[in-house]
Amino acid sequence: MLEEWKGKRVLITGASRGIGAAVARQLGTLGARVAVHYHASADKAQAVAEDIRAAGGEAVVVQGDVSRSEQARRVVDEAAAQLDGLDLLINNAGDMLGRVALGEIDDEHYDRVLDLNVRSVVMVSQAALPHFKRAGGGNIIHTSSIAARNGGGPGAGLYASAKGFVSTLTRNMAKELMNDHVRVNAVAPGVIATDFHARHSSEEQLAAMSASIPMGRTGTADECVGAYVFLGTDSMSGYMTGQIIEVNGGLLMP
């Protein structure tokens, strides 16, 4: 079944670190042609691309701030041009951009969080549609979050709400794009030990979160990869659309 990945053209936004980087490396190992997107972490993105090439895959690197509509469209078009088309889009770019309590949210923080976590998903997906139509179909996988279901922790209200938007948009896009032969699903990671929590959670907060997880620990980026591979493999998940796979060690059991 995994043979179908050979030559598959994939764009992953936010692929220079964390879950995006782990997914990019695995898809490269499977033989995909991967466009590694980054905003500011050029060295890390190049390192991911080099790992993919070392594993026998093909990788290109594209830069842009996907929170800005014009740049989001450019990133997609550049990736498709370098890959000679597009088969799979993974909307992974996103961040909390700091824990900010409701009473302290200003317009700048509001715009930054919503633009990065919501606008990017809408505009990157929109830009991918012409490329999917030329290919006769496609596949989109969004990265949501457990925060979309449980509201997130202190100061994460905007981020959690933005991820709730992503989860709802997943279902709507699945319906809207069905006639274009485009499947749309999402992966919702739980508490994953990446630099996301290194930036936004204290050791005490992480310890408390770990204690609440039935598996008794946080997850790793590599432990999220399988869900993306499954949703991106047509022979495995071809009858799935509008679904959200929760990867959280049992912290949330819908």
Image (cartoon, rainbow, N blue to C red):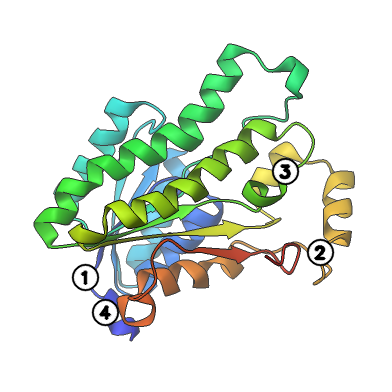
Q: Nearer the viewer, mark 3 or mark 4?
A: 3
On the question of residue 87 being in view, the answer is no
Per the image, label 4 sits on a secondary structure element best described as helix
- Give the vertical position of 251 relative to 131 (above or below): below
Q: In the rendered image, which quarter contains the N terminus?
A: bottom left
**Tag 1 near tag 3, CB within 8 Å:** no
Q: Quadrant of residue 163?
A: top right
Which residue in the rendered view is the most extreme toward the top? 107
Q: CA distance from mark 2 to mark 3?
A: 14 Å
Mark 1 = which residue?
7
Per the image, label 1 sits on a secondary structure element best described as loop
Can you give x and y, in whole percent of width and height, for residue 90 in the image? 39, 54
Mark 2 = which residue?
213
**Looking at the image, is mark 2 or mark 3 earlier in the sequence?**
3
Kindly identify the amino acid type of the residue bearing the numbered disc 2. Answer: Ile
**Looking at the image, is mark 1 or mark 3 earlier in the sequence?**
1
Q: What's the residue at 74%, 69% (across, down)?
A: 250
Q: Locate residue 142 relative to residue 218 in the image: left or right.
A: left
Q: CA distance from mark 4 to mark 2?
A: 35 Å
Q: CA distance from mark 1 to mark 3?
A: 38 Å
**Tag 4 near tag 2, CB within 8 Å:** no
Kindly identify the amino acid type of the residue bearing the numbered disc 3. Answer: Gly
Q: Number of labelled discs? A: 4
Badge number at residue 152: 3
Badge number at residue 4: 4
